[in-house]
């Protein structure tokens, strides 16, 4: 279920590279569009984690997503909160959703969480 108003998660666009991993966080639709354009014009594989601040499962998998970003350095990791980016994420019907890109095209999608399941999918696309 999609929540219409954001309850917190006032995330800033940044590139984290420390214990939290190497994850780009999109704070709004415009920033997310820029990230998507970069992914679509790049030959580098990427994974986008669509989540929400009010989603318990999303909050549980986000630390693992950040940690795994250190293990799969060939992949670009992106996090987009559906409430912070409502226009560009309107197609997302379930959180968390992970989309995998290769050569600028979406090649796979995973719904739900599970650290081992996510690890295996990342391995497959790295």
Image (cartoon, rainbow, N blue to C red):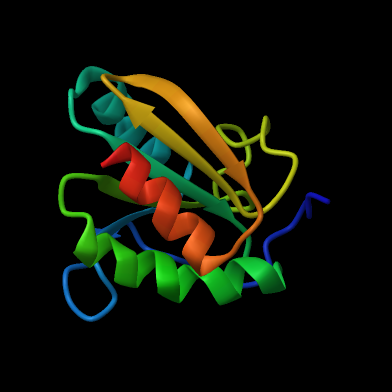
Q: Is residue 114 left or right of residue 70?
A: right
Please tell me in which quadrant of the rendered image residue 55 appears: bottom right
Q: Is residue 114 left or right of residue 42?
A: right
Residue shown at 23% from the left, 81% from the top: 19
Compared with 90, 80 (above or below) is below
Compared with 29, 22 (above or below) is below
Q: Provide residue 25's location: percent of width, then percent of height.
A: 36, 56
Residue 27 visible at all? no
Residue 28 visible at all? yes
Q: Provide residue 82's location: percent of width, then percent of height.
A: 61, 49
Residue shown at 60% from the left, 37% from the top: 89
Q: Most extreme residue toward the right, as rendered?
A: 1
Residue shown at 36% from the left, 63% from the top: 12
Closer-to-camera residue (30/117): 117
Residue shown at 24% from the left, 28% from the top: 38
Please tell me in which quadrant of the rendered image residue 85 appears: top right
Compared with 89, 37 (above or below) is above
Closer-to-camera residue (99/51): 99
Please tell me in which quadrant of the rendered image residue 86 appears: top right
Q: Provide residue 67's location: percent of width, then percent of height.
A: 32, 72
Compared with 77, 32 (above or below) is above
Closer-to-camera residue (121/101): 121
Give the quadrant of the C terminus.
top left
Q: Is residue 101 left or right of residue 7?
A: left
Q: Provide residue 37's location: percent of width, then percent of height.
A: 31, 24
Number of callouts = 0
């Amino acid at each position: 279920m999609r929540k219409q108003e954001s309850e917190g998660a006032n995330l800033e666009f940044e590139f984290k590279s420390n214990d939290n991993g190497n994850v780009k966080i999109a704070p709004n639709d415009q920033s997310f569009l820029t990230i998507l354009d970069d992914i679509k014009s790049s030959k580098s594989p990427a994974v986008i984690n669509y989540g929400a601040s009010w989603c318990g499962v999303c909050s549980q998998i986000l630390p693992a997503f950040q940690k795994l970003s250190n293990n799969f350095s060939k992949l670009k990791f992106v996090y987009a909160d559906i409430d912070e980016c409502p226009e560009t994420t309107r197609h997302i019907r379930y959180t968390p959703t992970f989309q995998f890109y290769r050569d600028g095209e979406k090649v796979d999608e995973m719904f739900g969480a599970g650290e081992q399941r996510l690890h295996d999918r990342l391995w497959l696309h790295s």
